[in-house]
Structure formats: C-alpha cells, structure tokens
Amino acid sequence: MKPFVQSLELERRAEGYFPGGVNSPVRAFRAVGGHPPFVVRAKGAYLFDADGNRYLDLFGSWGPMILGHAFPPVVEAIREAAGRGASFGASHAGEADLAELVRHCFPSVEKMRFVSSGTEGFM
C-alpha cells in the first residue's frame, strides 16, 4: 500500500469546507482512527485513490454499482441518456418504462415512487 500523501492533502482541503472533511457521517474516520482514502476513479470491482492504491469495492456505492464501475453497456446507456438531457424536473416516459421493469421483476408491487435519497423515500 502506498502512503496517503495525496489523500491527506485532499482531506485537509475538504476539512476547510465539510465537518470532518466528509459529506457523510458514514465516511468520517475520526471516531475509528486513520484517514479516509480519496477515490479518484473506479473500474469494475475496484476503486483507486489519489495515491494509486487499489481497493476491492465491497460497498458498490451502497447498491447502484452492482454491475461494477464503468461497465461499458452502462456507460453507453448513460451517454445516450445524457444526450437527451440531464434532468427535466418534469414527468418523463422513462419513469413508466422503469416502473414496468420493476413490476415485471416484483409483481407484488402495486404502486411505487422513485425518489432521490433514502430520507426522501422514508418521508
């Protein structure tokens, strides 16, 4: 493992803006000791930090990266979608397309709502 030189610099910079230098209490290291690695890229099942260390990603971004990072078919689908616009703030046919797929996979789901966060979902 390479020493955390760049990650420490990034941590110090982030501490000027965020409590504990992180945007999530889950990523806070002060309570457990050590310093957080600062990820700069990911590919497949691996994360790479600013210092060149490679980590097996056992979090998968808490679920969305189940197919791995930068999986070519997903990257292409994102490119195609981004070409049509990034966010509309309005209803879109893709919502019903996704709902049909969810219902197909989970027939017992009668109604659903897509939200942006766990907090929003809980509310």
Image (cartoon, rainbow, N blue to C red):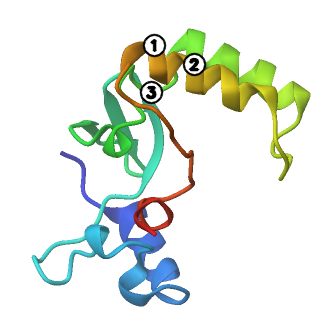
Q: Earlier in the sequence, mark 3 or mark 2?
A: 3
> What residue type is disc 1 on?
His
**What crowding class fits label 2: few (fewer than 14 Cα within 10 Å), some (14-19), or many (20 or more)?**
few
Tell me: residue 36, above or below residue 32. Answer: above
Cα distance in 3D space between marks 3 and 2: 25 Å
Task: Indicate the quadrant where residue 57 lies.
Answer: top left
**Helix, strand or loop at mark 1:** helix
- Residue 67 location in percent, x, y? 39, 19
Cα distance in 3D space between marks 1 and 2: 6 Å
Kindly identify which residue carries mark 2.
Answer: 100
Disc nearest the viewer among 3 and 2: 2
Q: Earlier in the sequence, mark 3 or mark 1?
A: 3
- Residue 25 location in percent, x, y? 31, 76
Say if mark 1 contacts mark 2, CB within 8 Å.
yes
The foreground one among 121 and 79 is: 121
Residue 69 circle label: 3
Residue 104 circle label: 1
**Helix, strand or loop at mark 2:** helix
Tell me: residue 105, above or below residue 45. Answer: above
- Residue 15 location in percent, x, y? 45, 86
Tell me: residue 88, above or below residue 96. Answer: below
Disc nearest the viewer among 3 and 1: 1
> What residue type is disc 3 on?
His
**What crowding class fits label 3: few (fewer than 14 Cα within 10 Å), some (14-19), or many (20 or more)?**
many
**Helix, strand or loop at mark 3:** loop
The N terminus is located in which quarter? top left
- Residue 83 location in percent, x, y? 88, 26
> What residue type is disc 2 on?
Glu
Say if mark 3 contacts mark 1, CB within 8 Å.
no
